[in-house]
Image (cartoon, helix red, strand yellow):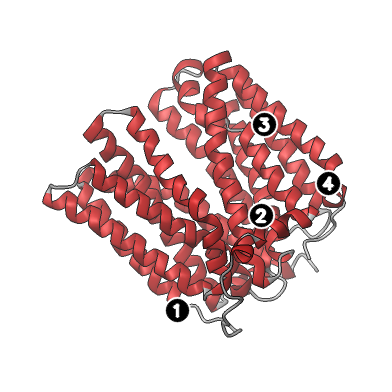
Amino acid sequence: MSASSTPARAATLLRHPPFQFYLWARGLSEFAYQMAAVAVGWQVYALTNSAFALGMIGLTQFLPTLLLVFIAGHAADRFDRKRVVQICRVVEGLAAMFLAWGSIEGWLNVTGIFAAVAVFGTAIAFESPAQASLLPAVVPDGMVQKGTAFSTSVWQFAVISGPAAGGFAYAVSPGFTYAAMTLIWLLAAILNGAIRLKQPVVEREPPSLAAVFDGVHFVRRNPAILGTISLDLFAVLLGGATALLPIYARDILHIGPWGLGMLRAAPAVGALLMTMVLAHHALNRRVGIRMFQAVIVFGAATVVFALSRSIWLSLVALFVMGAADTISVVIRASLVQLRTPDAMRGRVSAVNYLFINASNQLGEFRSGVTAALFGAVPSAVLGGVGTMAVALLWMKLFPALRKLERME
């Protein structure tokens, strides 16, 4: 394909109505979720003054994923994925409405907030595999990788802008924040319902215990998918240096809260710019080795960040980490979707989502424990070196993935 045709194909994708609705709905939903992360965390801490209570927010969100992930994946394969996502966003909007009502009326307590957080976690557990499985159906043929890149860029923009919007809204009042989230999630549900798919939705196999766990068996039987998902699991598990950013901002770089904000934004900015590049210039050759190279660059940038004593070098390292991670994410997500039959996409996406969530949560835990034992710098260096070592080991263990030329 000529270089001149690439922007035209990207523009065609952005004008494709099903993808437009999908993109807007996903962006708005993630924007509301990022607002919730700020508002819920601030309100829980204001009510409890407890760091333990803050930690319990993440656990309350993760437990529904752990308990329901295989059932959610099967639901995404058996029912209309568009409707599954739409129902989840309506549920999220209703939970936000409950928080708004309680905050405005003054009766909301910590128990009520955690109940709403559990509802958010349950809805997201069902929403994520259905949403990921829906993507190939809303893009024209041959454009899954570009669609994944655009979808990731919208997600990154929400990650950057959502917390800021949540903070400003919370300054007005908690009730105002939750009311805004309610409207945004309900709008996302309406946009999701407006998606028109070419293929009629048909019900798949009836529920059974074997069918629920078919996603795990499928991943185990496919070395390319198993290698891709497990590489991300161990790379994120070892390379969770972002959990240590407050320590670096206060004790190592001595830059204060404003500097912490810059450090947190740098990976997202790098990721956003890289998704824009990939949306216009798809990776069409040697995608397997490119993914391994991206993970190695991510690990090397982690080591540079760990040893840096300059705010500018640290920002550059974090920027590179975000950009390299995005290359790996886009390749992994596209590969999983394209190498999985449509009837299995929900269950395989659920396994992938569980791995991502587990690696993020456990990666932060690993960073905190090793930092407590050995210090923040050795912990971050160990994570970066470990990430590179895993990438090199996986190149040996999964030669078919290393030699993979194209997505399809």
Could you tell me if residue 281 is visible in this image? no
Q: Position of residue 342 (x, y in %)?
A: 66, 72
Tell me which residue sits at (65%, 72%) in the image. 343
Q: Give the residue type that dot 2 points to.
A: Val
- Where disc 2 sits, the SS reads helix
Looking at the image, residue 307 lies above or below residue 221: above
- Where disc 4 sits, the SS reads loop
Q: Give the residue type that dot 3 points to.
A: Ala
Q: Mark 1: few, some, or many residues within 10 Å (few <14, many ≥20)?
A: some
Nearer to us in this view, 342 or 23:
342
Give the residue at the far front of this rendering. 209
Tell me which residue sits at (60%, 84%) in the image. 198
Q: Mark 2: few, some, or many residues within 10 Å (few <14, many ≥20)?
A: many
Residue hosting label 3: 301
- Quote the CA–CA distance across marks 1 and 4: 41 Å
Q: Could you tell me if the residues under marks 4 and 2 are in contact, i.e. CB atoms within 8 Å?
A: no
Looking at the image, residue 326 lies above or below residue 338: above
Q: Could you tell me if the residues under marks 3 and 4 are in contact, i.e. CB atoms within 8 Å?
A: no
Nearer to us in this view, 45 or 249:
45
Q: Quadrant of the N terminus?
A: bottom right
Residue hosting label 4: 398
Tell me which residue sits at (55%, 35%) in the image. 362
Q: Give the residue type that dot 4 points to.
A: Phe
Answer with the quarter of the image where residue 323 lies.
top right
